[in-house]
Image: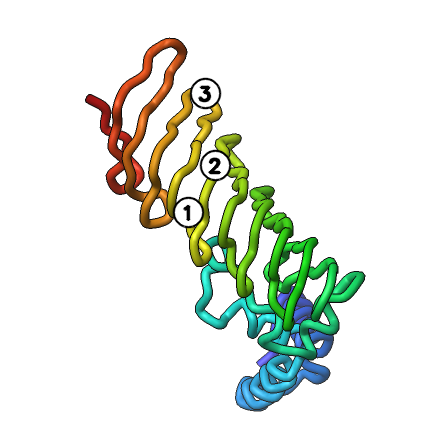
Amino acid sequence: MKFPESVLKYFFLICLSGFLFFGNCSSSQEKEAGGAEADNTKKSDPAKKTRSMEDSGDDKSLSGANPGADSAAKTESCLEGNCTNGYGVFLYSTGEKYSGNFKDNMREGQGKIVYPDGESYSGDFTKDKKDGYGEYKFKNGDNYIGAFKEGIISGKGVYKFVDGKIFEGDFLNNGNDGSGTLKAGEIIQKCQIKSRDVFCE
Protein backbone atom coordinates (compact mmCIF):
# COMPACT_ATOMS: atom_id res chain seq x y z
CA MET A 1 0.00 0.00 0.00
CA LYS A 2 1.40 3.36 -0.98
CA PHE A 3 0.81 6.40 1.26
CA PRO A 4 0.18 9.84 -0.22
CA GLU A 5 3.14 12.23 -0.05
CA SER A 6 1.33 14.53 2.44
CA VAL A 7 0.93 11.63 4.91
CA LEU A 8 4.62 10.73 4.55
CA LYS A 9 5.63 14.36 5.22
CA TYR A 10 3.39 14.39 8.30
CA PHE A 11 4.93 11.12 9.56
CA PHE A 12 8.41 12.52 8.90
CA LEU A 13 7.65 15.64 11.00
CA ILE A 14 6.29 13.49 13.83
CA CYS A 15 9.34 11.25 13.66
CA LEU A 16 11.67 14.27 13.61
CA SER A 17 9.91 15.71 16.66
CA GLY A 18 10.28 12.38 18.44
CA PHE A 19 13.97 12.28 17.57
CA LEU A 20 14.54 15.80 18.88
CA PHE A 21 12.77 15.05 22.19
CA PHE A 22 13.50 11.37 22.76
CA GLY A 23 16.66 10.80 20.75
CA ASN A 24 15.13 8.29 18.34
CA CYS A 25 12.08 7.49 16.28
CA SER A 26 10.80 4.25 17.76
CA SER A 27 7.56 2.54 18.62
CA SER A 28 5.21 3.96 21.26
CA GLN A 29 6.19 1.22 23.74
CA GLU A 30 9.85 2.14 23.44
CA LYS A 31 8.96 5.81 23.77
CA GLU A 32 7.03 5.07 26.95
CA ALA A 33 10.04 3.28 28.40
CA GLY A 34 12.27 6.17 27.30
CA GLY A 35 9.81 8.64 28.76
CA ALA A 36 9.97 6.88 32.12
CA GLU A 37 13.75 7.10 32.04
CA ALA A 38 13.52 10.77 31.17
CA ASP A 39 11.12 11.33 34.07
CA ASN A 40 13.52 9.57 36.46
CA THR A 41 16.31 11.81 35.26
CA LYS A 42 14.17 14.88 35.84
CA LYS A 43 13.35 13.78 39.37
CA SER A 44 17.02 13.92 40.33
CA ASP A 45 17.35 17.45 38.98
CA PRO A 46 18.91 19.70 41.67
CA ALA A 47 16.29 22.36 40.99
CA LYS A 48 13.64 19.90 42.20
CA LYS A 49 15.56 19.46 45.47
CA THR A 50 15.37 23.21 46.05
CA ARG A 51 11.57 22.97 45.80
CA SER A 52 11.45 20.56 48.75
CA MET A 53 11.34 23.52 51.15
CA GLU A 54 8.28 24.79 49.30
CA ASP A 55 6.59 21.41 49.60
CA SER A 56 7.11 21.13 53.37
CA GLY A 57 3.48 22.04 54.07
CA ASP A 58 4.18 25.52 55.45
CA ASP A 59 2.18 28.33 53.94
CA LYS A 60 4.94 30.81 53.13
CA SER A 61 2.62 33.79 53.07
CA LEU A 62 1.66 33.06 56.67
CA SER A 63 4.50 31.42 58.50
CA GLY A 64 7.53 31.63 56.26
CA ALA A 65 9.91 29.00 54.93
CA ASN A 66 12.62 27.31 56.92
CA PRO A 67 15.90 28.25 55.28
CA GLY A 68 17.69 25.62 57.36
CA ALA A 69 15.51 22.74 56.14
CA ASP A 70 17.84 21.83 53.27
CA SER A 71 21.37 23.05 53.78
CA ALA A 72 22.33 22.36 50.15
CA ALA A 73 19.42 24.44 48.86
CA LYS A 74 20.18 27.12 51.46
CA THR A 75 23.81 27.39 50.37
CA GLU A 76 22.71 27.70 46.73
CA SER A 77 20.15 30.37 47.57
CA CYS A 78 22.08 32.64 49.93
CA LEU A 79 22.75 35.60 47.65
CA GLU A 80 24.95 37.56 50.01
CA GLY A 81 26.05 37.88 53.59
CA ASN A 82 25.60 35.31 56.33
CA CYS A 83 22.32 33.39 56.04
CA THR A 84 23.19 31.22 59.05
CA ASN A 85 24.06 33.68 61.84
CA GLY A 86 24.14 37.33 60.82
CA TYR A 87 22.72 39.55 58.13
CA GLY A 88 22.03 38.03 54.72
CA VAL A 89 19.91 38.03 51.61
CA PHE A 90 18.20 34.74 50.82
CA LEU A 91 16.25 33.83 47.68
CA TYR A 92 13.76 30.98 48.16
CA SER A 93 12.77 28.56 45.40
CA THR A 94 9.24 30.00 45.67
CA GLY A 95 10.59 33.37 44.48
CA GLU A 96 10.41 35.03 47.90
CA LYS A 97 13.39 37.19 48.74
CA TYR A 98 14.32 37.79 52.38
CA SER A 99 16.76 40.47 53.50
CA GLY A 100 17.52 40.57 57.19
CA ASN A 101 18.93 38.87 60.23
CA PHE A 102 19.43 35.13 60.71
CA LYS A 103 20.11 33.10 63.82
CA ASP A 104 20.71 29.32 63.73
CA ASN A 105 19.60 29.15 60.06
CA MET A 106 16.31 30.90 60.81
CA ARG A 107 15.00 34.41 60.27
CA GLU A 108 15.39 36.23 63.59
CA GLY A 109 15.10 39.91 64.46
CA GLN A 110 14.44 42.54 61.81
CA GLY A 111 13.88 41.62 58.19
CA LYS A 112 11.89 42.07 55.02
CA ILE A 113 10.26 39.53 52.68
CA VAL A 114 9.24 40.46 49.15
CA TYR A 115 6.88 37.90 47.57
CA PRO A 116 6.74 37.13 43.82
CA ASP A 117 3.27 38.71 43.52
CA GLY A 118 4.59 42.05 44.83
CA GLU A 119 3.31 41.74 48.40
CA SER A 120 5.81 42.34 51.19
CA TYR A 121 6.34 42.12 54.94
CA SER A 122 8.78 44.25 56.94
CA GLY A 123 9.21 43.75 60.64
CA ASP A 124 10.06 41.35 63.42
CA PHE A 125 10.80 37.64 63.12
CA THR A 126 11.11 35.01 65.84
CA LYS A 127 12.24 31.47 65.04
CA ASP A 128 11.66 31.96 61.30
CA LYS A 129 8.11 33.36 61.62
CA LYS A 130 6.62 36.84 61.48
CA ASP A 131 6.32 37.60 65.18
CA GLY A 132 6.15 40.98 66.89
CA TYR A 133 5.50 44.26 65.13
CA GLY A 134 5.42 44.58 61.36
CA GLU A 135 3.86 45.93 58.21
CA TYR A 136 2.30 43.80 55.49
CA LYS A 137 1.64 45.43 52.10
CA PHE A 138 -0.94 43.67 49.94
CA LYS A 139 -0.82 43.67 46.13
CA ASN A 140 -4.20 45.45 45.92
CA GLY A 141 -2.76 48.50 47.75
CA ASP A 142 -4.14 47.74 51.24
CA ASN A 143 -1.72 47.47 54.13
CA TYR A 144 -1.68 46.27 57.72
CA ILE A 145 0.57 47.67 60.44
CA GLY A 146 0.55 45.98 63.81
CA ALA A 147 1.03 42.78 65.76
CA PHE A 148 1.93 39.36 64.37
CA LYS A 149 2.11 36.15 66.38
CA GLU A 150 3.71 32.93 65.14
CA GLY A 151 3.45 33.93 61.50
CA ILE A 152 -0.05 35.41 61.37
CA ILE A 153 -1.83 38.71 62.03
CA SER A 154 -2.80 38.61 65.70
CA GLY A 155 -3.27 41.45 68.18
CA LYS A 156 -3.61 45.21 67.93
CA GLY A 157 -3.19 46.79 64.54
CA VAL A 158 -4.32 49.20 61.87
CA TYR A 159 -5.59 48.05 58.48
CA LYS A 160 -5.57 50.75 55.78
CA PHE A 161 -7.76 50.10 52.75
CA VAL A 162 -6.72 51.41 49.35
CA ASP A 163 -9.95 53.47 49.22
CA GLY A 164 -8.86 55.46 52.31
CA LYS A 165 -10.90 53.67 55.00
CA ILE A 166 -9.01 52.73 58.16
CA PHE A 167 -9.87 49.90 60.55
CA GLU A 168 -8.14 50.04 63.93
CA GLY A 169 -8.56 47.41 66.62
CA ASP A 170 -7.82 43.86 67.69
CA PHE A 171 -7.26 41.17 65.06
CA LEU A 172 -7.57 37.39 65.49
CA ASN A 173 -7.09 34.33 63.24
CA ASN A 174 -4.80 36.07 60.74
CA GLY A 175 -7.18 39.00 60.41
CA ASN A 176 -10.23 36.86 59.71
CA ASP A 177 -11.91 38.03 62.93
CA GLY A 178 -11.65 40.98 65.28
CA SER A 179 -13.22 44.15 66.61
CA GLY A 180 -12.48 47.86 66.51
CA THR A 181 -13.42 51.06 64.76
CA LEU A 182 -13.76 51.85 61.08
CA LYS A 183 -13.02 55.38 59.95
CA ALA A 184 -14.37 56.48 56.57
CA GLY A 185 -13.72 60.19 56.15
CA GLU A 186 -15.33 61.89 59.16
CA ILE A 187 -17.51 58.87 60.02
CA ILE A 188 -16.25 56.57 62.78
CA GLN A 189 -18.15 53.36 63.57
CA LYS A 190 -17.69 50.45 65.97
CA CYS A 191 -17.30 47.28 63.93
CA GLN A 192 -16.68 43.56 64.06
CA ILE A 193 -14.72 41.43 61.61
CA LYS A 194 -16.16 37.98 60.95
CA SER A 195 -14.59 35.76 58.30
CA ARG A 196 -12.89 38.82 56.77
CA ASP A 197 -16.20 40.70 56.41
CA VAL A 198 -16.65 43.97 58.33
CA PHE A 199 -19.99 44.51 60.15
CA CYS A 200 -20.62 47.94 61.69
CA GLU A 201 -23.25 49.17 64.15
Q: Nearer the viewer, mark 2 or mark 3?
A: 2
Identify the residue under disc 3: 163
| Position in image of residue 92 (x %, y %) | 64, 62
SS class, disc 3: loop
Q: Which of the labelled discs sits on residue 104, or is there none?
A: none
Q: Which residue is mark 2?
A: 144
Q: Which residue is mark 1?
A: 153
| Residue type (three-letter) at the residue carrying disc 1 | Ile
Image-quadrant location for residue 91: bottom right
State which quadrant residue 8 falls in: bottom right
Extreme residue in the top direction: 186
- Callout 2 amino acid: Tyr
Q: Nearer the viewer, residue 22 or 102?
A: 102
Residue 11 visible from this viewpoint: no
> Could you tell me the amino acid type at mark 3?
Asp
Q: Is residue 140 above or below residue 132?
A: above
Spot occupied by residue 18 in the image (x, y as percentages of width and height):
66, 76
Q: Is residue 8 above or below residue 195?
A: below
Cα–Cα span, label 1 and label 2: 9 Å
The reply to whether the C-beta atoms of the residues labelled 2 and 3 are less than 8 Å apart is no
Front-lying residue, 35 or 148: 148
Q: Circles 1 and 3: CB distance less than 8 Å? A: no
